[in-house]
Structure formats: structure tokens, C-alpha cells
Amino acid sequence: MQRWIMHIDMDAFYASVEQHDDPSLKGLPVIIGGGLRGVVSAASYEARRYGVRSAMPMFRARKLCPEGVFLRGRMARYAAVSREIMAVLQAFSPLVEKASVDEAYLDATGLHRVIGPVETMAREVKNTVRETTGLTCSIGLAPVKFLAKIDSDLDKPDGLTVIYPRDVPAFLAKLPIGDIPGVGKKTLPTLDRLGVRFAADVARYPRDFWIRRFGKFGGVLFDRASGKDERPVVPYEPPKSESAENTFEEDTDDREFLVTWLLRQSERVGRSLRKQHLAGRTVTLKVKFADFTTLTRARTLPERTNVTRVIFDTAVSLLEDLAPKDKLRLIGVGVSHFEDGDKSPEPVTRQLSLLDAAPEEAPFAGPSVDLTRERALDAAMDAVREKFGVNMVVRGRLLEQEAKPREPKLRRGEKKDVSRHADEENSP
């Protein structure tokens, strides 16, 4: 049976959501990102005409497109729309792999017997996504995963491109070698010296040659350049960690300010873990100094947790142990070691010193907290926020901070692939 993989890629996702929710933004160059020291998270196609691209420093984007509409973005809103999109895809096939918030793979193998030709199915997917969300997507159809991904980018926005099995050799003959996933700036010069400029050129040398040259990746490169990719569409892959971080527009050594943001981040991480029924044993603190030096410190707890207070108190203790003497430009909190995706631990009625270290670590001081009370508090706050919005209930410490003179604004930090990050609300 012919294998068919579909790659669905939303068009300028964050910016398109903003334009959909606020029709006055349609046709305008919308740029999503942080402050002057941040980077562009997304740019509408109108903004791209000015040369603005994702990951570009915001100061450069403002120079290129001074007329742009610059927004900080709403991660919780984008996550909600992403869930709608994934639900649409899962209605077509049980084999849907979410690659990121705005892209996914769908295994369409054999579905022609139910839905009709794969091209017809792809059009139905596009139409249903548009009807459900008001947004457009571009789709690539191919016999293997990596070609489907490349395919989806060939006719954006709102495109549909198909690579039939008979056309794969001709496609590879014209595919620039740099378009193969994994081929980066460090690899390209070596390939160029070997006369490899297109994917088909890799076949000039045997597979063993590439393995000797690049190790395991050499074998992958040879296979991809030959049109081979046996990777299946994996419906769900448990997250390895959950984290949240913020980069400051102004470097700071204000301990109270840093601790307040650790609480905000601990709330975001804890709430996301509870929503996924996950809990972890290791809490990690991440800091980045003004000179861009990055340090992480981690502590393994006696048992898995998703309790906000546990995460927060552990992160604060790690910060105190680190005792940074220089100003920071970023701080973040993460939780990991979910023990193969085990569900949340059963409620514990006894009191536990939240800052007790694991047996192999040196103990550290900290307050004793009633976990039953903290879990009840988390559950109550989660319920209110789920029904009325994340800003409808605020912890007292954060409310006190809001009443003080305004601190430098922050932008939200983001990562892909390695860790799953909690949705972040708007900065104060």
C-alpha cells in the first residue's frame, strides 16, 4: 500500500490569529514579539514584505518596518487555537503528530478508501481548518515525512503541494542540499567542497563514506537524499520537561523582583503540569547574565510534584544558593523527570518540608508546608482560571507587587522541540 504523509503548517500563525481576532489588523504588517531586546516570534505576510522574519531582533524589525503593528502576543490564546486545529486533524486520522503549536503530521495512508484521493482529503482538511478557526494553512503531501515538510513550504500561504512517488527522484535532483533537515551552516561548506549542492548529489558517494564523515547523521543524510525516511507519525510523545522563562528589557539584581517572577513562572509551570496530569521530581533554575553567560541549577525532590508552592520554594532556594553577584537578563523555572509520563501523585496528608533534598543531596533549609492545603489551593485557582480567565485570581504576593511602582517590562521567552513550555500570560 502506498504510504502518504501530510504535513500541515499554519500560515504566519501568531500574526494570523491576531488579525482574525481583530479585523482592523487585516492587511497591516503585524509583528509579534517582545520589547526592544526581544526577537520576532511571528510576522504577518504584510510584514515579511519589509524583510521581517521570525527570530529577527526586534530593534532590526522596527528599523525595517517602522509602520508595523508590534504586539507582545497571547500565548494562551495561540495554544487554545492550536488545540482546535489538532482536534480537526484527529477527526480525519487517528495518527496525528503535533510537531509544534502551529504544525503537525498526519498519516493519510489507506484513507483514500474512506475519504477519496489524498488530494481531496488535503483540501477537506484545509477547508475544515478554515471553517473552524478562520485561519489558512499550507499542506504538503509526500510518501515520507521530511519531503512532506519541505513540500508544505513551497506554496505558502494557503498552498497545497503534492510529491507523487514517481516524481521523487526528479524533485531530489533539484532540491538544494541545505533544505534537507539537519544540514546546517557547519555542514554546508564540507558538502560544497565535495561538490554536493543538490540532494541527489549525495549518491555520488556510498553510504559508508557519509557515515565515516559525519557519523550517525551521515547515514541519515544519505537516506534523506535518496528519498528514504522510515519515521512513523507518532500520535503523542510525552514531554520531557515543562518550563517558563522571561527575559528582562533591563538587567536587574533586584531580588524581590526576581523572586516575584519565579512565583509567576512556578504558577504557569504548575498549572500546565496539573492540566496534563504530570508531575516531576527535578526543579531547575535557569539564569542568564548581562554578558549572556547562562547557568542552570537543579534539585531533585523526594517525590514527584506539580504543586506551585513546592516548585516556587525550590526555585527560590536554588537562587539563594547561586547568589548571583551580577545583574541578570533572564530567569526561568523548569520541572522534569516525569518518570515515563506517570500521572500525578496521590494527595499526601502529612506535612512535608518542601525544601528537603533528595537523599543523595545535602539538605537545605525551608518552610514546612501543608501539601493537602496547597493542592486544594492550586485546584481552586485552576478551576477559577479555567472558567473566568487566568487573571481573575491572583496570589497575594503578586498583588502586592502590582501595587508598587512599575518595574521594567518583560517579554516572554520561548523554546522548541527540547522542552514543553507552559503558556505565558501577558507581562505586567
Image (cartoon, rainbow, N blue to C red):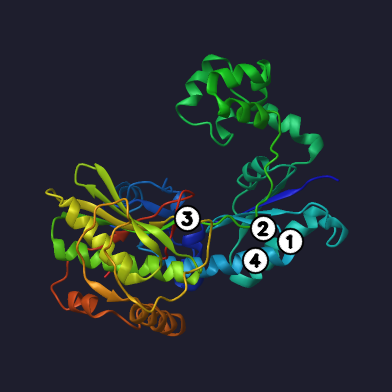
* Amino acid type, callout 4: Val
Mark carried by residue 39: none
Location of mark 3 (residue)? 46
Q: Nearer the viewer, mark 1 or mark 3?
A: 1
Q: Which element type, helix, strand or loop, lies under badge 4? A: helix
Left or right placement of residue 213 versus residue 3 in this view: left
- The residues tagged by marks 1 and 3 sit, at their Cα atoms, a distance apart of 34 Å
Which one is nearer the viewer's eye here, 328 or 349?
Answer: 349
Report x, y in % for residue 278. 48, 65
Tell whether 196 sits left or right of 24. right
Q: Is residue 97 visible?
A: yes
In this view, 21 is above or below 55: below
Task: State the residue at coordinates (45%, 26%).
Answer: 186
- 302 or 205: which is nearer to us? 302
Cα separation, mark 3 vs mark 4, equals 22 Å
Mark 3 neighbour class, 10 Å CA radius: few under 14, some 14 to 19, many 20 or more? some
Q: Position of residue 85 (x, y in %)?
A: 61, 65
Q: CA distance from mark 2 to mark 4?
A: 14 Å
Find residue 391 and report its horizontal and vertical position in percent.
Answer: 35, 79
Mark nearer the N terminus (2 vs 4): 2
Secondary structure of the residue carrying tag 3 is helix
Contact, mark 2 vs mark 3 (Cβ under 8 Å)? no
Q: Which residue is mark 1?
A: 93
Residue at x-position 18% and y-position 64%: 257
Q: At 28% across and 57% down in the image, what residue appears? A: 35
